[in-house]
Image: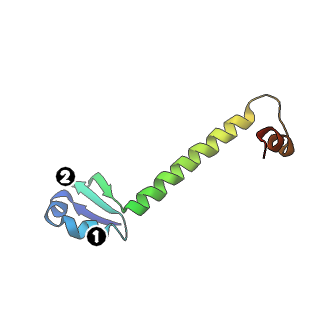
Amino acid sequence: MTSVTLSQFRNNQSDYIAAAQREPVEITSRGATRRAVLVSPDFFDRALEALEDQADIRAAAEARKEPGETISHEELIAELGL
């Protein structure tokens, strides 16, 4: 990961935006304090999708723990009219 100061980023924004298409760019301030991480839109979309998938997996696991009647796959297909 490339790491730059905020002032370096301000002076060369287009270069760092281009670099972020290849790898994340960490923007620091006041020494080593991380202020932001610049990533490509593709990286952001994949990360967001992975987080949403994890939330779905957790919700499904919780739903499986709930007591209640279960139905077979065939019954579900019939109920949905598929």
Q: Is residue 32 above or below residue 19?
A: above
* Residue 48 locus on image (x, y percent): 47, 52
Q: Quadrant of residue 26?
A: bottom left
Given residues 58 and 34, the one toward you in this image is 58
Q: Amino acid at mark 2?
A: Arg
Spatial CA distance of label 1 from label 2 is 24 Å
Residue at point 35%, 61% (across, down): 39
Total marks drawn? 2
Which of labels 1 and 2 is toward the front? 1
Q: Position of residue 47 (x, y in %)?
A: 47, 55
* SS category of the residue bearing label 1: helix
Q: Residues within 10 Å of mark 2 (few under 14, many from 20)?
A: few
**Residue on which the image places disc 1:** 18
Q: At 68% from the left edge and 36% from the top edge, which residue is drawn?
A: 62
Residue at image location 35% in from the left, 68% down from the top: 21
Q: Which residue is mark 2?
A: 30
Q: Is residue 35 above or below residue 38?
A: above
Give the left or right position of residue 73, taking residue 45 as reference.
right
Tell me which numbered mark, 1 or 2, is placed earlier along the sequence. 1
Quadrant assignment, res 74: top right
Q: Which residue occupies the foreground of this view, 5 or 43?
A: 43
Q: Are marks 1 and 2 in contact (CB under 8 Å)?
A: no
Quadrant where the N terminus sits is: bottom left
Q: Position of residue 38 (x, y in %)?
A: 31, 59
Which residue type carries mark 1? Ala
Q: Position of residue 28 (x, y in %)?
A: 25, 56
Which residue occupies the extreme front position in the image? 81
